[in-house]
Each structure stands twice: as structure tokens, then as C-alpha cells.
Image (cartoon, grey):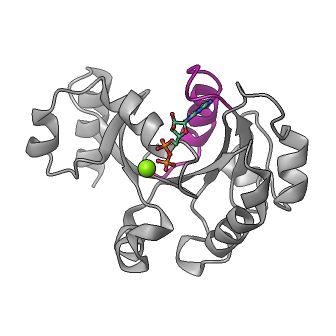
Amino acid sequence: MFLWDWFSGLMTYLGLWRKQGKLVFTGLDNSGKTTLLYLLSEQIEPSYYRRNNMYREAAQLTLGDVCYSIYELSSACGVKKWKDQFDTLDGIVYFIDTTDRDRFEESKQELDSLLCHEQIAKVPILVLANKIDRPCVASEEEIKQVFGLQQLTTGKGNVPLSELQTRPLEVFICSVLKRHGYAEGFKWLDQYTNAK
Ligand SMILES: Nc1nc2c(ncn2[C@@H]2O[C@H](COP(=O)(O)OP(=O)(O)O)[C@@H](O)[C@H]2O)c(=O)[nH]1
Ligand SMILES: [Mg+2]
């Protein structure tokens, strides 16, 4: 084990090998998951998917020395497909459409059911409050309040995992369309994943 750690550390240092991680994009339909997935996958050549046996609806994101595979899994994918992914999950990215107040309750229920799932109780959750480029969007505070997240968020800085009493969770407002806001969210998430 020591030898392996030493070897992988050396390879990582030399830039010859990256650790692997897995993230899941989820949330109601129309919240922006596929748009961001496509945006990230623009950076990969198509043969990558075949070589790495990945679904087509997946992308890759490299943060520091970790290379994350990202999958989109909405509730419409079916619980079975979701559960198959649980054991190897490094992080969950939950999308909210900040313009769609009519569906906040529905979205809250979906997020709540994730939050109380025992098998993923320690998995960090990044909430992306998307579409803030549009008029009349809900603010970060409103999202936190409506979704009951005020007591659950753990801070946006570099709070070490050992200092957190609970699972890492934060809300970042963003516009996938304008390509801003989500990078800070991923950076935050990266510090808490097992792959790190
Ligand atoms: N204005 C705006 N529209 C967005 C943004 N992100 C996604 N959309 C639009 O929202 C719709 C649904 O996006 P999609 O990625 O298919 O959502 P999914 O069902 O969660 O995968 C599409 O028409 C996107 O162009 C954003 O940041 N701002
Ligand atoms: Mg989609």
C-alpha cells in the first residue's frame, strides 16, 4: 500500500497520472444539467467515451490532480440506475432553476429525498442555483430559505472536512448560459471529495 501511494503520488506529481472521481448531476428537468454537461464535454474528443466505457451522456472535468467523470441522473432515470451509482459517488451536483418558482416545492422534495438517503449521507452536495442571467430570479437567500438549507450549508471557504459537523453542502448561484458561477462551485466541491 505504501509503495502504491508513493508510486501514484510520483506519477501524479509528474503529471502522468490523475486520480479518478465520479460526480452526478441531478435535479428537476429543465434546470440546466445537460447544457452544462455538453459545455464540459466540448473539451473531450468523442473516442474518449468509447475508450473509457462511459455513457454518452457523460463529461469529464479535471480539477487539480483529479479527473472527474460526470453523469446526468434525473429522477426520471429510475431509482435503480441511481442506486447503482451510489457506492462510487464522490459528489452530487443538484441543479435548481431559479426562475421556476412554481416548481420549487417539487424540487425541494427531490432534494430532501437525496438528503435523507443513508447510503449517500456523507457525499458532498453542491447546489447550483442556475439561470441567474434571467429577470426575476430567486436570490441565493431565497433559495436557501425555500429549500430549508439555511442550517445545512457548511461555508464556502476552505473549511476542512474534519471541522465540519455534517456533510459538506453549499449553494452557488450561476448561469450556465453565461458560463459563470459554477466553476467556483466545483472548486468548493473538489476539496471534499474522496478522490481528493
Ligand atoms: N437563461 C438560461 N437558460 C438556461 C441556462 N442553463 C440552461 N438553460 C436552458 O434551460 C433549458 C433546459 O436546459 P437542459 O440543460 O436541457 O436542462 P436539464 O433537463 O436539466 O438537462 C434549455 O433551453 C437551456 O438552454 C442558463 O444559465 N440561463
Ligand atoms: Mg437533461
Which residue is rendered at x = 35% and y = 72% of the image? 81
Left or right side of 127 for 22 = left
Asked if the stretch drawn in magenta spans residue 189, the answer is: yes
Task: Give the image quarter of residue 137.
Answer: top right
* Percent position of residue 61, x then y: 38, 33
* Percent position of residue 185, x then y: 63, 35
* Percent position of residue 175, x then y: 63, 28
Asked if the stretch drawn in magenta spans residue 16, the answer is: no
In terms of depth relative to the viewer, which is nearer, 51 or 39? Answer: 39
Left or right side of 48 for 2 = right
Left or right side of 179 for 128 = right
Which residue is rendered at x = 74% and y = 43% of the image? 98
Which residue is rendered at x = 29% and y = 34% of the image? 18
Tell me if I can see residue 66 in this picture.
Answer: no
Span shown in magenta? 174-194
* Percent position of residue 157, x then y: 76, 33
